[in-house]
Amino acid sequence: MTAMIELDNLSKSFGNLVAVDGIDLKVNKGEVLGFLGPNGAGKSTTMKMIAGFIEPTSGTANICGLNVLENPVLAKSRIGYLPEGAPTYGDMTARRFLDFVSEIRGFDGTERRRRVDMVVDRVILQSVLDQPIDTLSKGFKRRVGLAQAMLHDPEILILDEPTDGLDPNQKQHVRRLIKDMAADKAIIVSTHILEEVEAVCTRAVIISHGKLLIDGTPEELMSKAHNHNAVVISVDSAYSDKVIEVVPVVSGVKGIDHIGKVGSIGRFRILPQPGSTIAEPVSAALREAGVDVQELYVERGALDEVFRQITVANPEAGEDKHA
C-alpha cells in the first residue's frame, strides 16, 4: 500500500536548536494518527513541514506521492490544515471567511455555496455565520478553522488540537466527525487530551526532543502501562490476610498491592507477569479459599501513564515558539 503521508529522515533546526530530528513515518488511507509529545517536542513543527508551511532542514515529506518542496501547490491541494490557534481574518464574518477560502481553493458560484453550506452544517456554525470572527468564543473560532480545513474535501487532514476550547458536547461532535471522515482520508491529530486518542485514533506516535519514540495502536501503547491487565478486587477486610496469602502464589501473578480501604471493604491491585492474563486463575483461587469477592475488574492501562514512562527518559527541554 502506498502511504498517503510519508516522512523520510525529516529534520528541522532553528540555529542550534534541533526541533525535529530525523523522523521516519508513514500514514495510510483510513488511519487516524494521534501525534503526541510534551510541549516543545516538535509536533507543530513537524505538521508545518508536512503542510508545506516551513521547509525542512533535511529529509523529505511526501503527500500522496508528491514531494512537498518539489510540487508545493499540487501537494498542498491534497491537504486540509488546522494549525495551532487557527489564525483567521478576525474582521471577517465566519461566512465571508469561508467564502474567501472557497474562492482561493478555486470554487465559485453554486459549487462554492454548496461547499460552504456543507461544512457549516457538519461543524454546526449556523448560529454565528454573520458574526465577525474576532467576536466568537475560542470554541467557535476553532470550529471555523476546522470548517476551512474540510472545505475542499482533502485526502489528508492535519489537525492541531482540533477540540481545543470546545465544551464536552462539541468535543464529542468533532470526534464523531473525525471518525466519519477517516474511511477515505489519512488524518493526523495532535492533541494533549489523551482520552481523545482512545476515542478517535487507530494509531499513535509519541515524540520528544524531536525524535519519534514509539509507534503503535492505542491498545499496544496501553499494554506498556504498569497496570495493564492488572486485576483489581474488593473484599471484606476480614478476608485481607487470606487474599495476601493466596494470591501471590497464583500462576502468572507478579505482585499484589493494597490500594485502599473504604469502611469495611479493602481493595487490592494484583499485577500480572508480562504477557499473563490472570483474572480467571485469581478468581478461581479466591473462590477455592472461600474469599467472598465483591468486585473484580481488569485494568487496561492508561495512556497518560505510558506517556510519562516514555517521555521521562526524554524530559522536555521546555516549550519554545517553534515546536
Image (cartoon, rainbow, N blue to C red):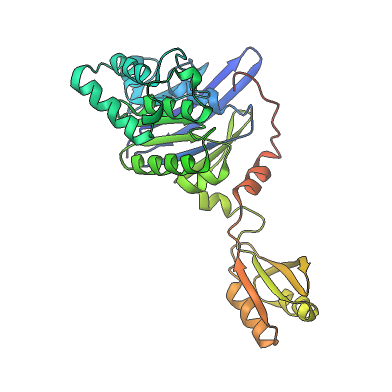
Q: Is residue 201 visible to the viewer in this orientation of the structure?
A: no
Residue at the (42%, 20%) spot, across then down: 131
**Residue 119, image x, y percentages:** 33, 30
Is the residue 100 above or below the residue 297 in the image? above
The answer to which quarter of the image holds residue 241 is bottom right
Tally of numbered tags: 0
Q: Is residue 107 left or right of residue 243?
A: left
The image shows residue 316 at horizontal and vertical percentages of: 69, 31
Residue visible at 59% across and 19% down? 322
Between 288 and 137, the one lying in front of the other is: 137
Task: Please say whether residue 247 is visible from this viewpoint.
Answer: yes
From the image, which quarter does the N terminus lie in?
Answer: top left
The image shows residue 249 at horizontal and vertical percentages of 72, 77
Location of residue 245 by image quarter: bottom right
- The picture places residue 265, in percent across and down from the top left corner, at 75, 73
Q: Which one is nearer the viewer's eye here, 157 or 135? A: 135
Q: Is residue 279 left or right of residue 1?
A: right
Residue 173, compared with residue 59, is above or below; it is: below
- Give the residue at x 57% y 40%: 193
Q: Quadrant of the C terminus?
A: top right
Question: Considering only vertical position in the picture, is 272 above or below 187?
Answer: below
**Could you say which is closer to the camera, residue 184 or residue 95?**
95
Residue most extreme to the left = 110
Residue 253 left/right relative to 93:
right
Depth order, front residue of 283/62: 283
* Residue shown at the point (35%, 33%) measured from the top left: 4
